Amino acid sequence: QVQLVESGGGLVQAGGFLRLSCAASGSIFSIGSMGWYRQAPGKQRELVATITSGGGTTYGEFVKGRFTISRDNAKNTVYLQMNSLKPEDTAVYYCNSKVVSGQRYLEVWGQGTLVTVSS
């Protein structure tokens, strides 16, 4: 079994910053892409950022240079540095990872961490 554990969410004022972390653990043979998605109340879950095992990145259009995704392959951990936060960034942020465990290919989600940006 593979688990993703997120941390780093919280309450921040507009213009502030937060750093989210997500660590994968369990029976892991290899990890492919890792990423972050978010879901605001009443809205669909949307892509924030992804990063491949080789370091290639993609970002949601709304990021506009404010967020940076990175990973530490030795620690099976992905990070999301969020700067210049806006009230509209308020959402539950979910970690996602593509994992090979045993002979199975899994897509795993974290439990989510709440980010609240006050105006």
Image (spheres, grey):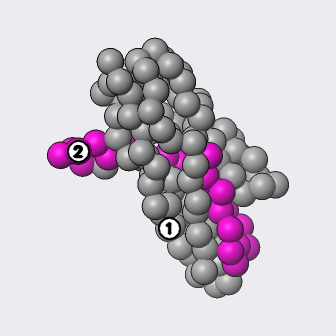
Residue at (70%, 78%) from the top-left corner?
27
**Mark 2, other Cα within 10 Å: few <14 / some 14–19 / many ≥20:** few
Specify the segment rendered in magenta: 21-44
Q: Position of residue 8 (x, y in %)?
A: 57, 42
- Residue 94 horizontal side relative to residue 62, left or right: right
C-alpha separation, residue under disc 1 versus residue under disc 2: 24 Å
In this picture, is 7 found above or below 80? below
Looking at the image, residue 13 lies above or below residue 33: above
Q: Nearer the viewer, residue 97 or 79?
A: 79
Residue 51 visible from this viewpoint = no
Q: Which residue is mark 1?
A: 107
Q: Which residue position is annotated with label 2?
A: 41
Quadrant of the snapshot with the N terminus: bottom right
Q: Amino acid at mark 1?
A: Glu
Mark 1 or mark 2: name the one nearer the start of the chain.
Answer: 2
Q: Hey, what amino acid is under mark 2? A: Pro
Residue 1 in sight in this render: yes
113 lies above or below 29: above
Quadrant housing the C terminus:
top left
In this image, 24 relative to 87: left or right? right
